[in-house]
Amino acid sequence: MFNYYPLFIIIFDIIFGLLFWTFIIKFFLHLFFSNETNVKFVSNFFSITNSIYNKLNRIIPSFLPYPLISLYLVWLIFIIRFYIVPAFSGLENIGNYVFYLEKNLIFYLNFNILF
C-alpha cells in the first residue's frame, strides 16, 4: 500500500490521524472524567493533550467551552486531512489520498485476509 501514496502525504496523514483520534478520545473521556481524576492513565492522557492545547492556543477561539475544544480541533484536522493534504498532490486527487492511516488499519485488520 505504500507504493500508491507520496511520502509527504503519508507522514502528514499519520501525524494528523493520530491527533484526530487523540482528540476524539479526549472528548469522550471528558464525558466520564474530570481533569482532576485519580485514574492515572486518564490524568496522564489529559496532561499530554493539554500540552498540545497550549501549543495550538492561537487557533482555538476563546468563546469555546473547554470540553468542546476537542471537537473543534477534530473538525479542523478533518478539513486539513480531507481537503488540504490531498490538494498538495493535485486537486484531482482529493478523495484518493484521504485517511491513509485508517485505510491501513482496515487493510491490516481485515480478517478475510488472515484466513
Image (cartoon, rainbow, N blue to C red):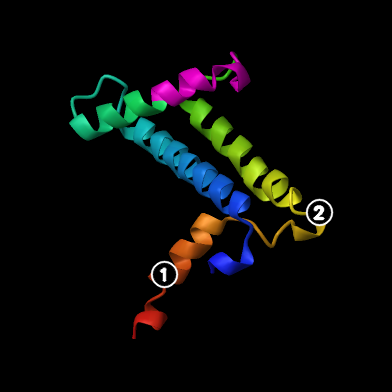
Residue at 23% in and 24% down: 37
Residue at 62% in and 51% down: 9
Name the foreground residue: 77 vs 67.
77
Mark with earlier residue (1, 2): 2
Say left or right for 58 vs 109: right
Query: Based on the displayed image, in which of its 4 quarters is residue 30 positioned?
Result: top left
Q: Is residue 59 above or below residue 79?
A: above
**For numbered disc 2, what is the local secondary structure?**
helix
**For numbered disc 1, what is the local secondary structure?**
helix
Task: Say whether residue 74 is magenta.
Answer: no
Residue at 56% in and 49% down: 13
Q: Amino acid at mark 1?
A: Tyr
Q: Is residue 71 above or below residue 16?
A: above
Which residues, given as a range, are shown in magenta?
A: 50-62
Query: Based on the displayed image, in which of its 4 quarters is residue 57 positioned?
Result: top right
Q: How far apart, in angstroms, are the residues tagged by discs 1 and 2?
A: 28 Å
Which residue, given by chain and number where applicable, does mark 2 sit on?
91
Task: Say whether residue 59 is magenta.
Answer: yes
Q: Residue 80's x, y, as percent?
A: 66, 41
Q: Residue 54's x, y, as percent?
A: 47, 18
Which residue, given by chain and number where applicable, does mark 1 sit on?
108
Locate the N terminus by quadrant.
bottom right
Q: What's the magenta bit mostly, secondary-structure-wise?
A: helix
